[in-house]
Image: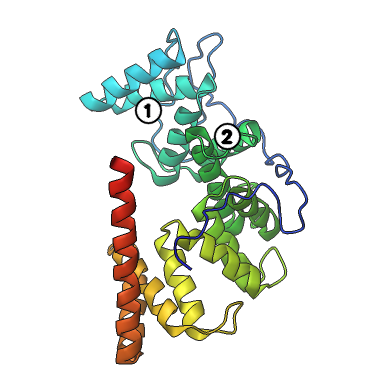
Amino acid sequence: MLGGPQVVLAQDISGTKLLPPRAIPGGALPEPDDSVRVPGAAAIAPAPDTPTAHTALPLVPFTSARDALKAWMRDSTAGNKVGAVRALEYAASQGHLTAQYKLGRMYAGGEGVPANDLKAFEYFSKIADENADAIPGTADARLVGSAFVALGNYFSDGIKGSYVKPNPDRAFDMFHYAASYFGDPDGQYNLARLYMTGQGASRDPRQAARWMKLAAEKGHAPARAAFGEMLLRGGEGVPRHPVLGLMWLAMAREGADPARESWIIERHDLAFAAASANDRSAALALIERQHLVNSRSGTAAQN
């Protein structure tokens, strides 16, 4: 179960070559009425009913996206949020992938800008529509895969008060493409969850276990915990194997963020408390063996 090939699948289970998902719905956001436009520069729409000091200013006509990114780093370091966002928006308007992704994350989390899920959705949509054929394994592909995952989450829940409605089928499309074409572990984990619940696809415990295992092998802590519980229970796409289940839960516990993933710690503690002494010892021995293998591999790579 450990050390298996980290597969980036370019085909689905039927062997049919994957096609990029359909274009994401939605058009350009409306421009603010009171903005001052610079010829040839595209402004970004403000969040509804939120402070819009930075969006009311024109995009600075930098000489290039690279020049804008330098200004973004300089203004960010100096604490000039307005200048930093304007510079980043200019780079994004020039098609700079990293700038588009950064802005999507900023608007999704309200980091340095008013939180605006619709604007985040628009940025991630642009990334997905224009870069669906990025070469897997590259730095750009990792950003594109993450954008598809973000879109999957938006289609799962919808965006209140917008044209983005809950759509399980489209969520499945986004997660499946991120998981299969880009090999994204977040996409694989979310795809597994859809197969477990039957949302956007027929319920399929075997496929759920398959995708969960792929994400677990890449170090995805929630996937490791979920796959461990599958093995502890058995009958949900995998045979019952308590020792391996405890091993995966212990490895999930090691990589869990206590602030955001306390549920992993709780389930690990409950599982180990209920396990027999022999199963606990066997699971810990497997983990020690894996750590030793990883240590040797790291030493060999350095040499």
Who's the residue at 35% across and 68% down the image?
A: 251
What residue is drawn where x is 53% and y is 18%? 94
Tell which of 170 and 276 is nearer to you.
276
Q: Using residue 94 as the reference point, say whether residue 115 is left or right of it.
A: left
Q: Is residue 160 visible?
A: no
Q: Eyeballing the image, is 227 above or below 219?
A: below
Label 2 crowding class (10 Å Cα cut-off): few <14, some 14-19, many 20+? Answer: many
Q: Is residue 246 above or below residue 26?
A: below
The residue identified by callout 2 is 127
Locate residue 73, reporting x and y percent: 30, 23
x, y percent for residue 206: 64, 72
Quadrant showing the C terminus: top left
Element assignment for label 1: loop
Q: Would residue 29 be visible to someone looking at this image? A: yes
Badge nearest the viewer, 2 or 1: 2
Q: Amino acid at mark 1?
A: Ala
Residue for badge 1:
53
> Residue 29 in the image: x percent, y percent?
59, 32
- Relative placement, left or right, of 222 versus 179 is left
CB atoms of marks 2 and 1 within 8 Å: no
Residue at image coords 67%, 71%: 198
Could you tell me residue 5's position as x and y percent? 52, 56
Give the side of residue 77 with respect to residue 26, left or right.
left
Q: Which residue is at the far left?
A: 78
Image disc number at residue 225: none
Residues 294 and 135: in front is 294
